[in-house]
Image (spheres, rainbow, N blue to C red):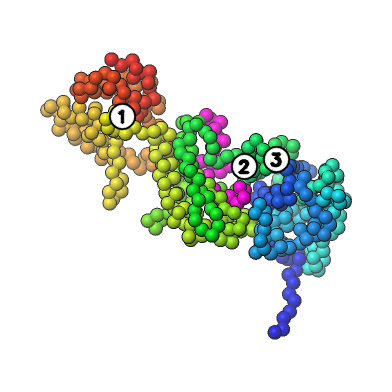
Amino acid sequence: MTSRNAPPRADALIESLRGLGYTVATALADIIDNSLTAGARNVDIQFEWAGEQSWIRILDDGAGMTDPELEGAMQLGARDPRDERAADDLGRFGMGLKTASFSQARRLTVASRAQGHGVACLRWDLDCLAESDGQWSLLEGAHPEGAPALSALHELTSGTVVLWEKLDRIVTAGFQAEHLFEMIDGVERELAMIFHRLLSGSDPRFRLRINGRPVSPWDPFMIGHPAKAWESPTYSIPGPHAVQVQCHVLPHKDMLTPHEVSSAAGPAGWASQQGFYIYRNRRLLTAGGWLRLGDRGRQWTKDEPFRLARIMIDIPNSADAEWKINVLKSTASPPVSLRPHLKRLGAETRERARKVFAHRGRLIAKSGTGGGLPDVWLARKGPRGTSYRISRENDLVQSLLERAGPLRRELEALVKLIEETVPIQRIWLDTAEDRETPVGEFSSSAEADVREVLEAMYETLTEHRGLDAETAKARLSRTSPFDRYPALIAGLG
């Protein structure tokens, strides 16, 4: 068999790779992955504004590289993604350093020092490649303009500096200093989410700083919050690779302070952050979304009633191929064998989240001896959808109907009219537009209005239902929404 050597043109290939779809944050995350694999305990990112000469520097105190090691790291595709990696290795394709850097900058300089060795420095310059007739011309040393930014490495016994210059994908026409500052804030939020499990705890895996300011981790699951609605045990799903899943339903915003509401929303907002969070070696790959799972032939969507549902999935790096991890480490797809397990856990979490959202985070009292009064409204699912009916079992409703006498027919008609004219579409539209459940349950009522209704309920229970005072108060204290007014209940009678 005859063959021909057909190497790609360097300039054409790299220009094509620039369009993979990195954002500034995901590109920086790829560089940080390399720092962590090298054992770094500190990573410092510096954004320097200088118009078209602006630059970004990533400095770590990891093991560093010798000159031959650095040359290998600067090659595209230097490692086979099928090779077995160390269990804690955050890389896979041997492309991240280059593709992430080229996505933002036309000049990439890397300087590194391994302990006991001198500083090695190599750079790619896409403008030089364009003039090299398609050759892979890897340049030695820093460009004079970028050399001062590499001086921080001299203070370390080992470590690596990655320098991005010619930021043509960032500093575009009209881009000003204030745009850079806004971008930095967004990058900080994204990195605080991607690495939150590695940045948290009393002994974090590493410390991350941006322009000298420590990055605080953002926990999507609000671990340990006292108002949290539900947190499942950690489930291990059987299969060729160990996969662990934990389900979470966050507190309703009524149970949070304004600062907690803003913080828990995450970079993309409450509704967009719902769904599965996939981690590889505790590093976040995908944040939110329902992995194209669903029921009755329809995929689940990011709807408001499920905004409090977040599910953590941990996979090892040995499962990369099985989960179809892409070069950007920003997408993942569960294998077919795991989808039924994830669908079951997702459905349960969504249903729990829907109930918490609908009832504004409060537990719903159950009817029965010693419990609260039956809910006024009942939801009934039928072939044409869900309808809402007023419960005839509710003590106040039942008492009024029994004592209505000649007005019972008109009262029954009024109840039926209310049931048939519930403004479901208006409520749905208001919920979608306001991104919050409509106000109810005496949320805006004066205390006197609440007391008036409570007294009527108390009178019904004691005078017409035959309960003694203490039993009536106990049932009211377990009934929504009166359970929020213990002082008013205690003053009845």
Query: Which of marks 2 and 3 precedes in the sequence?
Result: 2
Q: Disc 3 marks which amino acid?
A: Arg
Q: Secondary structure at mark 2?
A: helix
Q: Position of residue 103 (x, y in %)?
A: 70, 55
Residue named by callout 3: 207
Q: Secondary structure at mark 1?
A: loop
Q: Disc 1 marks which amino acid?
A: Gly
Position of 224 with respect to 483 (left or right) is right
In space, the residues marked 3 and 1 are separated at their CA atoms by: 50 Å
Quarter holding residue 21: bottom right
Would residue 79 be visible to someone looking at this image?
yes
Residue named by callout 1: 372
Position of 230 with respect to 123 (left or right) is left
Q: Position of residue 481 (x, y in %)?
A: 36, 28
Magenta-highlighted residues: 257-283
| Residue at 27% from the left image edge and 32% from the top image edge | 368
Quarter holding residue 6: bottom right
Q: Position of residue 84 (x, y in %)?
A: 66, 61
| Residue at 18% from the left image edge and 34% from the top image edge | 412
Q: Position of residue 467 (x, y in %)?
A: 23, 22
Quarter holding residue 413: top left
Residue named by callout 2: 196
